Image: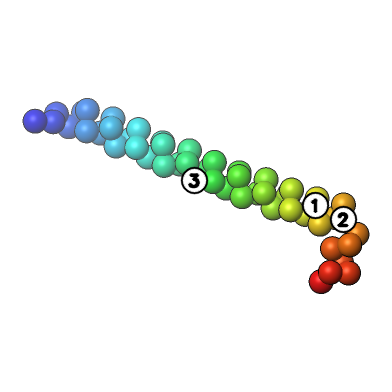
Amino acid sequence: MFNPRSLYSLFTLFVILLQLCSYLVYHIQTMMLRTNREIQGSQPGWCWLN
């Protein structure tokens, strides 16, 4: 059914996609943390609420 070369290329493509997804998730998490920190820093009322 499958020749091993196409299976291997499919596997490498899957690994590349997985790495890309993990990188995107990490990037989005750091961006969200940064925006949260900026929001907390720009609002002085935050310190008093906590």
Q: Secondary structure under badge 3? A: helix
Q: Is residue 6 left or right of residue 43?
A: left
Q: Position of residue 48 (x, y in %)?
A: 88, 69
* Crowdedness near tag 2: few (<14), some (14–19) or many (≥20) residues, C-alpha within 10 Å: few
Residue ranking furthest to the bottom: 50
User: In the image, which disc is placed on residue 39?
Assistant: 1
In what element is the residue under mark 2?
Answer: loop
Instruction: Specify the amino acid type for callout 2.
Output: Gln
Measure the alpha-carbon separation of dots 1 and 2.
6 Å
User: Which of pointers 3 and 2 lies earlier in the amino acid sequence?
Assistant: 3
Q: Which residue is mark 2?
A: 43
Looking at the picture, how far across and down is residue 26, in whole percent?
57, 48
Which residue is identified by label 3?
22
Q: How many marks?
A: 3
Q: Residues within 10 Å of mark 1 (few under 14, many from 20)?
A: few
In this picture, residue 31 sits left or right of residue 2: right
Disc 3 vs disc 2: Cβ atoms closer than 8 Å? no
Question: Disc 1, disc 2: CB below 8 Å?
Answer: yes
Where, by quadrant of the figure, is residue 7 drawn? top left
Q: CA distance from mark 3 to mark 2?
A: 32 Å
> What's the amino acid at mark 1?
Ile
Q: Residues within 10 Å of mark 3 (few under 14, many from 20)?
A: few
- Tell which circle, 3 or 1, labels the residue nearer the N-terminal end: 3
Give residue 47's position: percent from left, percent from top.
Answer: 87, 67
Q: As rendered, which of 4 and 28 lies closer to the eye?
A: 28
> Looking at the image, which residue sits at the far right?
44
Q: Is 35 on the left-hand or right-hand side of 27?
A: right
* Quarter that holds the C terminus: bottom right
Residue at x 87%, y 55% (from the top left corner): 43
- Circle 3 or circle 1, nearest the eye: 1
- What's the coloring here? rainbow
